[in-house]
Image: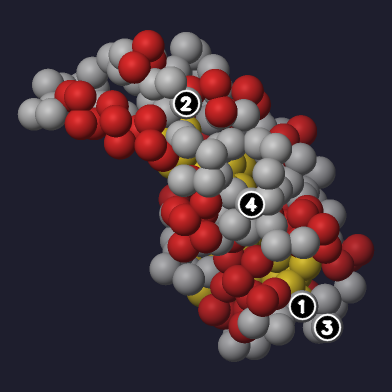
């Protein structure tokens, strides 16, 4: 269990991007405060293949990609790919839909070269794979290292995730915890964490750690309509 957060003590709460707030898992942000966020999409080495040939998650099932795909080592994310391919919500709890996604993933397995969530950029950078799943932060890392990794936001929709600050029940130092959260919400403070993770933080209106220039914007900061 987690404890409700007293947002009246968070004077920097207004700095947060409204699009990062009031999500279905915490409609009023009473229990979590967003810090950094990221999205999972399709990565393509544009030197090895034409990015226009892959526009959907469903394309990853093509037989020509046998033994050549990267998937993240995350069951929830991988299941979302199959669920979206089948036209279901990535957050479904319907046992029949989940079972259908399982069987769809069984069909995909011959195409999979590796599962990697430690450093999803590395297989692309080492030339082990040219297409598969990728995090926006990992794609940025690969591009900075010279790998022409393009990010495709699939037609069925991508997945996204937030790193948030929840309260454990009865923390020993409530005031200290609130001060830390408030500090992270101050202008400029979240950039350090974002820079370390190569992910954008949850505050709008200024340069992001993972967005050094306009050319990287679609990688670091995908439009919210693409990753619901």
* Label 4 – label 2 distance at C-alpha: 18 Å
Do labels 1 and 4 touch, CB within 8 Å? no
* Label 3 – label 2 distance at C-alpha: 44 Å
Label ID, residue 148: 1
Circle 2 is placed at which residue position? 12
Q: Nearer the viewer, mark 3 or mark 2?
A: 2
From the viewer's perspective, is residue 167 above or below residue 39? above
Query: Which of marks 4 and 1 precedes in the sequence?
Result: 1
Closest to the observer: 163 or 151?
163
Residue at image position (77%, 49%) is 154
* Label 2 – label 1 distance at C-alpha: 38 Å
Closest to the observer: 19 or 125?
19
Query: Which of marks 4 and 3 precedes in the sequence?
Result: 3
Q: Residues within 10 Å of mark 1 (few under 14, many from 20)?
A: some
Circle 4 is placed at which residue position? 208
Q: Residues within 10 Å of mark 4 (few under 14, many from 20)?
A: many
Circle 3 is placed at which residue position? 47
Asked if residue 148 shows in the view, the reply is yes
Instruction: Examine the image and state in which quarter residue 3 appears.
Output: top left
How many marks do you count on the picture?
A: 4
Q: Secondary structure at mark 3?
A: loop
Do labels 3 and 4 touch, CB within 8 Å? no
Asked if residue 110 shows in the view, the reply is no
Do labels 3 and 1 touch, CB within 8 Å? yes
């Amino acid at each position: 269990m987690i404890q409700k957060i007293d947002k009246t003590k968070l004077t920097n709460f207004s700095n947060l991007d409204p699009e990062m707030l009031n999500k279905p898992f915490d409609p009023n942000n009473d229990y979590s405060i967003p810090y950094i966020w990221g999205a999972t999409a399709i990565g393509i080495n544009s030197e090895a293949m034409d990015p226009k040939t892959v526009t959907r998650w469903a394309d990853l099932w093509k037989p020509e990609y046998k033994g050549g795909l990267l998937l993240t080592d995350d069951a929830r994310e991988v299941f979302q790919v199959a669920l979206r391919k089948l036209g279901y919500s990535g957050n479904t709890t319907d046992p029949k839909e989940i079972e259908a996604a399982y069987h769809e993933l069984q069909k995909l397995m011959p195409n999979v070269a590796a599962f990697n969530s430690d450093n999803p950029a590395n297989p692309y950078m080492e030339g082990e794979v040219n297409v598969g799943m990728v995090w926006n932060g990992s794609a940025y890392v690969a591009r900075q290292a010279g790998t022409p990794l393009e990010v495709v936001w699939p037609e069925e929709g991508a997945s996204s995730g937030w790193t948030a600050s929840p309260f454990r029940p009865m923390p020993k130092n409530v005031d200290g915890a609130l001060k830390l959260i408030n500090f992270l919400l101050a202008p400029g403070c979240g950039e350090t964490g974002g820079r370390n993770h190569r992910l954008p933080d949850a505050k709008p209106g200024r340069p992001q750690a993972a967005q050094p220039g306009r050319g990287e914007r679609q990688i670091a900061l995908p439009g919210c309509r693409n990753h619901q």
